[in-house]
Image (cartoon, rainbow, N blue to C red):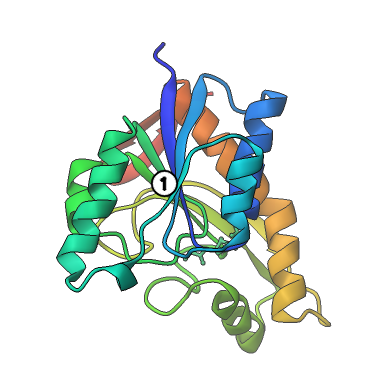
């Protein structure tokens, strides 16, 4: 089977990128290579993680383009030029352009720090997701890895994992527990399943061959 070439898109600390790098090193993810890392923010720690792992990295920021269309095109062109089979959104907090979604149907995965459809969609990203979960008083939250389609956080769900919410949680402690117990496992596992041809999407649902 052909090696899956992935491009990882990041905006911040890059702990999910690190989980993918580690997963490749320890054999949790097979048949896969990281072609490149793209950040919309210069100077973020995710870029250092890429450098330490000898992965080429690029900054493509909407702020550097007068027209959003030009940013969208530059992003797509970079992803294309890396020979990308699968785009991995690992804490990428920029809305994915439709031209990319059209060109990479069921070939873009995202990790979201809640149990979709809870705390998802417009305005729910990063710590805001955990603030909302604590405000609502849910006893369980978690993470979801899913394919990206035109509706925000609403593409076919690949895997989810629930994580307990504790009474004394702050958004930060809850975020950390969800990362440790759910995100850093789900994302590498999903990539591995895709790389090994175990995932099929039919009528908006994901079927996994075990
Ligand atoms: C992660 O919790 C990820 O699930 C979330 O941003 C964080 C990035 O952390 N993504 C979203 O909220 C997307 N809607 P990281 O840079 O350490 O991987």
Question: What x and y, as percent, mark residue 88?
Answer: 44, 45
- Label 1 packing within 10 angstroms: few (<14), some (14-19), many (20+): many
Residue of label 1: 109
The residue lying toward the viewer, choosing from 203 and 123, is: 123
Give the residue at the far top of this rendering. 1
Q: Within 8 Å: ligand 1 and the Cβ of disc 1?
A: no
The residue lying toward the viewer, choosing from 58 and 24, is: 58
Picture quadrant where residue 177 is located: bottom right
Question: What x and y, as percent, mark residue 201?
Answer: 32, 36
For the point 46% across and 60% down, the residue is 92
- Secondary-structure class at tag 1: strand
Q: Tell me how many marks there are.
A: 1
Q: What quarter of the picture does the C terminus occupy?
A: top right
For the point 32% across and 73% down, the residue is 63
For the point 57% across and 62% down, the residue is 44
3 relative to 5, above or below:
above
Question: What x and y, as percent, mark residue 114?
Answer: 56, 65
11 relative to 109, above or below:
below
Whether residue 60 can be seen here: yes
Whether residue 186 can be seen here: no
Question: What x and y, as percent, mark residue 165?
Answer: 74, 72
The residue lying toward the viewer, choosing from 118 and 97, is: 97
Give the residue at the far right of this rendering. 168
132 relative to 29, above or below:
below
Apparent side of residue 79 relative to residue 189 in the rendered image (left or right): left
Q: Quadrant of ligand 1?
A: bottom right
Apparent side of residue 61 relative to residue 137 in the rendered image (left or right): left
Picture quadrant where residue 87 is located: top left
């Amino acid at each position: 089977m052909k090696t899956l070439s992935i491009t990882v898109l990041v905006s911040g600390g890059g702990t999910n990128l690190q989980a993918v790098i580690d997963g490749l090193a320890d054999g949790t993810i097979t048949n896969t290579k990281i072609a490149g890392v793209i950040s919309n923010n210069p100077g973020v720690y995710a870029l250092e993680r890429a450098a330490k792992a000898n992965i080429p990295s690029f900054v493509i920021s909407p702020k550097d383009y007068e027209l959003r269309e030009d940013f969208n095109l530059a992003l797509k062109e970079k992803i294309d030029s890396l020979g990308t089979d699968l785009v991995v959104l690992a804490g990428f907090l920029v809305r994915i352009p439709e031209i990319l979604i059209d060109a990479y149907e069921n070939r873009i995965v995202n990790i979201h720090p809640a149990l979709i459809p809870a705390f998802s969609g417009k305005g729910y990203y990063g710590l805001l997701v955990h603030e909302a979960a604590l405000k609502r008083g849910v006893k369980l939250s978690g993470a979801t890895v899913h394919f990206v389609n035109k509706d925000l956080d609403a593409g076919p769900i690949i895997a989810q994992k629930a994580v307990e919410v504790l009474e004394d949680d702050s958004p930060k402690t809850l975020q950390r527990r969800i990362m440790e117990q759910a995100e850093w496992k789900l994302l590498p596992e999903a990539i591995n399943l895709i790389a090994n041809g175990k995932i099929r999407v039919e009528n908006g649902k994901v079927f996994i061959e075990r």
